[in-house]
Each structure stands twice: as C-alpha cells, then as structure tokens.
Image (cartoon, rainbow, N blue to C red):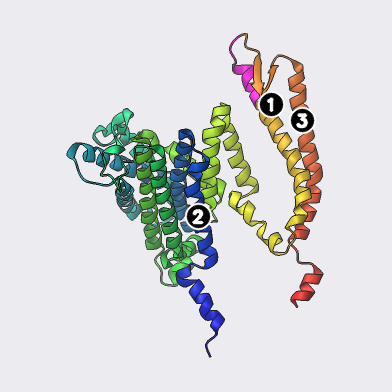
Amino acid sequence: MTDTSSIMAKKRSYGGLSTGTVAPWVICTAILLVLPYVFQSNSALTIMNQMAITIVFALAYNMLLGQGGMLSFGHAVYMGMGGFMCMHVMNWVEYENIPLPLPLLPVIGGLFGMGMATIIGSFSTRTAGTVFAMISLGIGELIAASSVIVVAFFGGEEGVSGDRTYGLPVFGYEFLTKIEVYYLTAGWLVLSALLMYLFSRTPVGRMANAVRDNPERAQFLGYSARWVRFYSFCASGFFAGVAGGLFAINFEILTEENLNLVTSGSILLITFLGGVGFFFGPIIGAIVFTLLQSVLSLQTELWQLYVGALFVLTVMYFPGGLAGVLMMHVVPYKLGKLGTLVVPYIKTLIPAAIGILGLASFCELMFHFKHAAVGEHDMSLFGIEFSTHSPIPWIVIIGLTVIGFWLAKRSSAELRETWGNANVMTSSKEGGAQ
C-alpha cells in the first residue's frame, strides 16, 4: 500500500524545490518590488542597483570558491569583459539601429563572459589550489594591463561609454528613469540567483562539492575532477558576465577598474565576509559591503580601514562569515533556548559596541590630528564638536574604549556558558524524545 504522506512530500518537493525552499524566494521578490516605494530617492535606487549587481557577481564567484573550492584572484575579468562587450553592443544599437531590447543585454554579457571562461578554463581548471589561484592572478593582471593597450576594445584609460535609451522599447518602457532600471536589474537578480541555486542542485553542482572536498575519491567514483571544475568555471563566468551587463546598463560606462585586481579582491572579500559555505552568504556580504562602501565612505575617509578590520576579524573568529553566525543559532532555536541568549548578548555586545566605537573614534581623532590643515583644531564626531588639541576628548574616548572592552570581556564568560547550555538538549527533552 502506497504511503500517502510520502506522495504528498514528493509533490511538495518536486524537482528539489520544497514549500520551505520556495517561500524565501517569494518573500525576497516581494521585498524587491516594494523597496522603491520605501526608498524613493535616486541615490537610494543607485545604491540598490549597485547592491543587486554585486550580489549577482558574488554568487557567481561563490560558484567557484564555495561550491568548487577554486580560489580565484582574477574573477573580475569575466564581469569586466562581459560589461565591455555589452557597451559595444549598446553603441552598435545606437549607431546601426539594431532592434535589440535592453533587457536582453545581460545575456550577451553572460555569453561573452562564458566564452572567456571556456578559453581560460580549458587550461586553468586542470587542478585547483595554489596553481589555479596563481593562474587566475596572472590572467587577471594580463587582461588588466591589456585594457590600457588594446584601445579599440577597452577604450584606453577613458574606457567605453554608451547610452541605454537607444534600445528597442519593451512594453513602452525606454528605461529613461532610475526606477525602470531598478526593476530590470531586480528581475535579473532574481532570475540569476534562482538559476545559480538550481545549478547547485544539479549533479554537476553536487559533484563540485565532492571535488572540492575530496577530488581523489570523486575520481575513484568515475567522475573527472577537471571537467567538473571546468563546467562550474564556465557557469560562473556566464553569471559574472551577466553582472557586467547589468553594470553597463546602470552606469553606461566601463573602465579598467572593472576588471583589475582591486575589483577581484573586493569580490573575494565580499564572499568571505558573507560566508562561502552558504548559498545566501554572498548575498549578505554584498549587502553589507555595499552599504559600508556607499554610506560609511560619506562619513569618514577611513572606511576602508574599518572594512579591512571587519574582514580580518571575520576570517579569524567567524570562518563561516556572517551567514555562519546566523546559522549557529539554528540549534538553540530548535531546542527552544534562543531566548536564554538575549540577556547575555545584551550584557556583552553593548559594551563591545561601545569599545569598538571608542576605538574607531580614537582612529578618527588621530587621523584628524595628523592630517588636518594648519590651525584647524576643531572636528565633529557623532554630532559633537570639540578640539583635537584639548586633552578631554582623548581621555573620554580612551576611557570609553577601555571600559567597553573590559565589560565585554567580563561578560563573555557568562555568554560562553549560556551558549553551551543553549546548544545542549535538556534531560527532560531527552526523556520526552525517548
């Protein structure tokens, strides 16, 4: 007799997509549709577009690093090449009157990025580890240097610019406004993220995890580690090219900065910050990094110092990234002990935040003291005006830093004990389970 519950479970999980898996996609799509009505300024739309592009690029990079175990130092090449190709197509549409709808432009960028990945991956994916990383670094530097030499394609130091409004109108929309471009970018974000997630559920995606963990065992099972890495590399190059196409649509210009080592290093930082072991990790990393880059950079010149410190601390103490920190709380939540962590968190994190703000304030104070113009003694910090040549601000800031970290360290023992208890099933629950 057929088990009815198993049949219903299969229906709810057809194709690997269960109800619990579909719900987050629906919620995120709804949030993307509502966001422009919450943040209506052009600057906010620009930041959200940049965030969406970074998410697509970070997810594409995570197909290499997180799923395939391939550390690349030059993955911006595929985004940049796809973006440059889209800029040339955009100009051909303008000057040759080619009837090409603008929403199809990321496909061209993706195909061009995948073509580059196919050529480079044919020899770079023979092995992973240090060899692959060094090859990616060399290719990245080679193409970045060529971007200044091959002016016909890369436009030299000025780059290549275009105008997206000459494309074929789609349902009457010519993408003249920021909100129209936002919805185009958001649509490609959802589609790209969904396709990358589905790719991770395919046999190739599953075998990429096996090759990452133990390539010798995967070969003993009859799978070629090289070809698995190659297919993952080509798929990653495609979606990186899609991100480049979205960048071309949004900013209508690409330069050497879009494919150099700095951009490749940034996406590596973003992916590690979010968490390479989780599919949604790069999404969190891209959101946090974009906010830090766009908002924090307007407040201080030392924003790169703080982002670098955050990255180092994440790698040292939270190797799973921000997503790993969130997933650590799944067990306490399932055991019903998540509430016991609230008070220890407050007693530890608030003093730690005070200490961190105090340390950042000390850095700002020192920077202003060393680099301010002659005779400029006054500065503003958190809306408070004071003189950097007065000893009082130094004493207050150093005192807050020391007291904050001391209180956090004092409360950390209680937090560790509570955390240990929250991850252990109590005897009553064990008896009930038996």
* Mark 1 burial class by Cα count in 10 Å: few <14, some 14-19, many 20+: some
Disc 2, disc 1: CB below 8 Å? no
Point out residue 248 in the picture as x, y percentages from the top left corner. Answer: 35, 39
Question: Residue 400 got which mark?
Answer: 3
Q: Is mark 1 on a helix, strand or loop?
A: helix
Question: Residue 90 got which mark?
Answer: none
* Front position among marks 3 and 2: 3
* Mark 2 burial class by Cα count in 10 Å: few <14, some 14-19, many 20+: many
Is 367 part of what is drawn in magenta? Answer: yes
Distance Cα–Cα, label 1 vs label 3:
10 Å
Return the residue at label 2: 66
Q: In this view, does 178 lie above or below 119?
A: above
Amino acid, disc 3:
Leu
Question: Residue 362 got which mark?
Answer: 1
Considering depth in this image, is 219 or 24 the residue closer to the camera? 24
Magenta segment's dominant SS is: helix
| Quarter of the picture holding the C terminus | bottom right
Q: Describe residue 214's horizontal placement relative to residue 98 as left or right.
A: right
The residue sitting at the left extreme is 96
Amino acid, disc 2:
Gly
Point out residue 221 in the picture as x, y percentages from the top left corner. Answer: 44, 72
Q: Which residue is drawn at 77% across and 71% down?
A: 429
Amino acid, disc 1:
Phe
Q: Residue at x 43, y 66 (%)?
A: 202
